[in-house]
Image (cartoon, grey):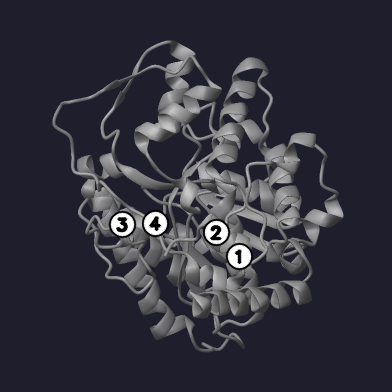
Amino acid sequence: MAIGASTLEGLGMKRDAFSFADFNEPVHADTLAALFGGTYAGRRVLVTGHTGFKGSWLVLWLQSMGAQVFGLSLPASDALNHSVLLKLPVTEALIDLRDAAAVRAAVMSFQPEFVFHLAAQALVRRSYVTPSDTFDVNVMGLVNLLEAVRATPSVRVVVNATTDKCYVNVNTTRGYVEGDALGGHDPYSASKACAEIVSASYRSSFLGDDDGRGYAVALATARAGNVVGGGDWSADRLIPDLVRSAVSGKAVQIRYPQATRPWQHVLEPLAGYLLLGQRLAADPRACAEAWNFGPDESGQRSVGQVIADFSNHWHAVKFEIDTSTQWHEAGLLSLNCDKALERLGWWPVWDAATMLKRTAQWYQRQHDDGHLNSLADIHAYVIDARAANVAWCWDEASVAATATATASATVHARQLA
């Protein structure tokens, strides 16, 4: 089953709509550096797709923890791009993943210890228009990156972010688990299923054993649901379209109001990626596999519900139902994240109400006076995570103890059930 409020409450974990972040107290730099057992402070980390929505948030969080971050991506798309607005000092290579020689040269130049691969053609509707490019970027771009990793002895950990859409979708109410069949109706989903297979092949064929560098490279994949948060301006994504409607006064066209998705704030899966990177560094074999990172039950919402909730925070939103013929999109999709709960000690921090409230506030503040709430949102998220006793907030010993206790309590709860 998916992680629910009742499951978390049974384990003594905080799950309510109250947010300590409302006090707007900053988190001390030492506290940030100690997150994830202090794994990233002073470490060399490469983020591909660092100019994208999720990548820019990851760079900000890593830098706030004291990591030396490098970026590999296409140039930022426009002046409102989150990475452009943040103006973070990043040593970067603005290149195409499909250029194997350039990717290899960049990675070897950076000499990273950790690689978080987020670069992708990530839009479903665009994949119908440019299927060849989608497969080329999402599959062969990954191959080029992994070949560069093989040529770079400094790399110890690779986390490849794929998607919840990599599963064969049978429109079931049961959340998909990591062992379910891979597939994909649209080219984007299929390309990410291919990326999962490529990752597994490289792990078993090349990276899972010492290739002469003195240690194995730990490679895992992370499958997350729909993410929201400030700074996303992508076309054909719900929240950016709603923001554009609120600002312009024009109604946004909604294609599938009944479609249900796992919605979560962007910081939720990023916390999962960072926790996974920490565990892979500590034990390259223990966690080098696929992982789901999705919301609790409150985040499992239809498009229509998200629109209504977001509109409560920004009343200027207007929308119309588009009844014209559309490309196929899955009607129902959910993730089962029990594995991450039991083995990593990861669970969502913000419920759907908090997620949408803080997202709306980010866009409203940026629109009103140009201020970015990004770092404040990270601080707020960390404060609430610490209040919820989330494992990655504490030192390495506490992380291990909390994860073990969480797994034991979950097993016990199921036995009682």
Which residue has dot 2 on it? Answer: 6
In the rendered structure, find residue 163 and report the number of the disc placed on it: 4
Contact (CB < 8 A) between labels 2 and 1?
Answer: yes
- Residue 164 visible? The answer is yes
The mark that comes first in sequence, 4 or 1, is 1
Q: Which residue sits at x=57%, y=40%?
A: 355
Residue 199 in the image, given as x and y percentages of width and height: 39, 72
User: 379 above or below 82?
Assistant: below
Kind of element beneath mark 3: loop
Of labels 3 and 4, the one closer to you: 3
Q: Which residue is mark 3?
A: 173
- Crowd class of label 2 (few under 14; some 14 to 19; many from 20; radius 10 Å): few
Kind of residue at badge 3? Thr
Which residue is pictured at 41% across the width and 55% down the height?
A: 97
Give the CA separation, mark 1 to mark 3: 23 Å
Instruction: Give the residue type that dot 4 points to.
Output: Thr
Label 3 Cα neighbours within 10 Å, binned few <14 / some 14-19 / many ≥20? few
Residue positioned most to the left: 325
Is the C-beta separation of discs 4 and 1 under 8 Å?
no
Rendered residue at 65%/79% (across/down): 404
